[in-house]
């Protein structure tokens, strides 16, 4: 009986770890999409004369940092 409980506990822990990993992946994709949207908005504002180059550079830097940390998978999943 103890072997069964140990296996069940191990499977439950594995399931929790997989769920947590998937949740973190989804959050990273959402954050990447938000950063990409921010870059687009900053660029649009700059082109319309109501934004600045520094805002575009800040948005680009934030996006590049995100990509360096989480990869660029969100660019293909959008």
Image (spheres, rainbow, N blue to C red):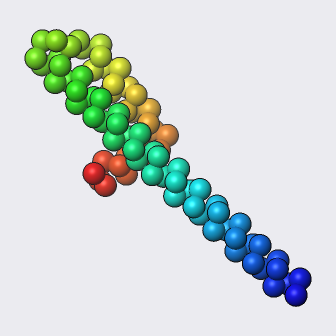
The image quadrant of residue 67 is top left
Q: Does residue 48 lie above or below 18 as drawn?
A: above
| Left or right of 17 on screen, residue 64 | left
The image quadrant of residue 49 is top left
Q: Does residue 17 lie above or below 36 as drawn?
A: below
Q: Residue at x 71, y 66 (%)?
A: 13
Q: Residue at x 12, y 19 (%)?
A: 47
**The furthest residue to the left:** 48
| Left or right of 44 on screen, residue 4 | right
The image quadrant of residue 40 is top left
Q: Residue at x 49, y 40 (%)?
A: 69
Taking depth in this image into account, of 10 and 66 the one nearest to the observer is: 10
- Quarter that holds the N terminus: bottom right
Q: Does residue 1 lie above or below 63 as drawn?
A: below
Taking depth in this image into account, of 67 and 37 the one nearest to the observer is: 37
Image location of residue 9, percent across then percent down: 77, 73
| Left or right of 45 on screen, residue 21 | right
Q: Residue at x 31, y 55 (%)?
A: 77
């Amino acid at each position: 009986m103890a072997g069964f409980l140990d296996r069940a506990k191990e499977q439950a822990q594995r399931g929790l770890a997989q769920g947590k990993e998937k949740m973190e992946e989804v959050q990273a994709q959402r954050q990447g999409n938000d950063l990409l949207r921010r870059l687009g908005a900053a660029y649009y504002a700059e082109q319309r004369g109501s934004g600045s180059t520094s805002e575009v550079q800040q948005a680009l830097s934030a996006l590049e940092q995100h990509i360096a940390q989480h990869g660029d998978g969100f660019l293909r999943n959008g």
